[in-house]
Image (spheres, rainbow, N blue to C red):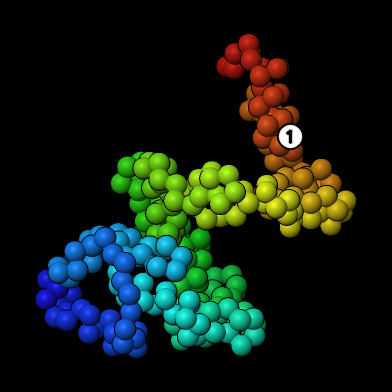
């Protein structure tokens, strides 16, 4: 019996929960002690794509993606559960049933609304125990922790460069593919990341959000501000 959740037959529970009668488990955990499922992280590994999970239930739900059990008839995307598929279909239908009571913005999922609401409330419940930095989402904290651990689980298949999060890997891959999906609507110049496009747009808008604390001159880019400080104010003393 699991001493934490009191499930007596974990295998039976997983089979009942997922609807699977046979499966293969690749695990680094001791399956004879079910309570370890609650303390070990990423011990269960998908034999198809090597993605790791902290519980068998998470792994078996994930396997539904490879089996195509819950497949979208619109785009062919496979989801891990019936409820996940229902949420995904809102992308095609445009349905956004969850509305923010502060700004009226609408969302496809209640969980996204909860995260959004913290922007208004300022709530950041997920705190780093190393440096004290707090985050709105637990997933963001998990990625942040890799700054302290040095973990970089996302590896480039072309040059083996590693990254701490999947988004950074996706951006990096565009170096190899040449893809530049973010295009300026004024001059058609294209960029690999949205941040670069945002910075570029200041050339057209004239926006200068970076102000020198010494002489109050403003600049479009933080790098230009730093160059200004080094060349003009490096020897100046501020009262």
Q: Which residue is drawn at 46% across and 65% down?
A: 49
Taking the image as shown, residue 1 lies to the left or right of residue 172, namely left
Q: Is residue 151 above or below residue 17?
A: above
Instruction: Indicate the position of residue 142 as horizontal and vertical percent values.
Output: 39, 54
How many discs mark residues in the rendered view?
1
Q: In this view, does 145 lie above or below 103?
A: above
Q: Residue furthest top?
A: 235
- Characterize the local packing of mark 1: few (<14), some (14-19) or many (20 or more) Cα atoms within 10 angstroms: some
Where on the picture, by quarter, is residue 209?
Answer: top right
Instruction: Indicate the position of residue 225 as horizontal and vertical percent values.
Output: 69, 29
Q: Which of 73 and 204 is in front in this view?
A: 73
Q: Residue furthest right?
A: 187
Instruction: Indicate the position of residue 151 as horizontal and vertical percent values.
Output: 40, 45
Instruction: Indicate the position of residue 192 as horizontal and vertical percent values.
Output: 70, 51
Q: In this view, does 146 lie above or below 228?
A: below
Taking the image as shown, residue 47 lies to the left or right of residue 231, namely left
Q: Name the residue under label 1.
A: 219
Q: Which residue is drawn at 81% across and 54% down?
A: 184
Q: Is residue 34 above or below residue 163?
A: below
User: Would you say residue 98 is visible in this rendering?
Assistant: no
User: Would you say residue 63 is visible in this rendering?
Assistant: yes
Where on the picture, by quarter, is residue 233?
Answer: top right
Which quadrant is home to the N terminus?
Answer: bottom left
């Amino acid at each position: 019996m699991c001493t934490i959740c009191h499930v007596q037959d974990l295998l039976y529970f997983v089979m009942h929960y997922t609807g699977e009668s046979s499966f293969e488990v690749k695990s680094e955990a001791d399956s004879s002690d079910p309570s370890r499922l609650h303390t070990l992280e990423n011990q269960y590994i998908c034999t198809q794509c090597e993605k790791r999970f902290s519980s068998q239930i998470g792994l078996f739900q994930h396997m539904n993606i490879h089996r195509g059990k819950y497949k979208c008839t619109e785009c062919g995307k496979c989801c891990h559960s019936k409820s996940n598929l229902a949420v995904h279909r809102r992308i095609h239908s445009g349905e956004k049933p969850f509305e923010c009571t502060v700004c009226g913005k609408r969302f496809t999922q209640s969980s996204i609304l909860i995260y959004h609401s913290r922007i208004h409330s300022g709530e950041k419940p997920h705190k780093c125990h190393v440096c004290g930095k707090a985050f709105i989402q637990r997933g963001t904290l998990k990625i942040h922790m890799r700054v302290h651990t040095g973990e970089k689980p996302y590896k480039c298949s072309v040059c083996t460069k590693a990254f701490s999060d999947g988004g950074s890997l996706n951006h990096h891959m565009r170096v190899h593919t040449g893809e530049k999906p973010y295009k300026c609507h004024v001059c058609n110049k294209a960029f690999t990341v949205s941040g670069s496009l945002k910075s570029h747009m200041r050339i057209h808008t004239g926006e200068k959000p970076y102000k020198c604390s010494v002489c109050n001159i403003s600049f479009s880019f933080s790098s230009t501000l730093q160059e200004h400080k080094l060349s003009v104010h490096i020897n100046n003393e501020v009262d």
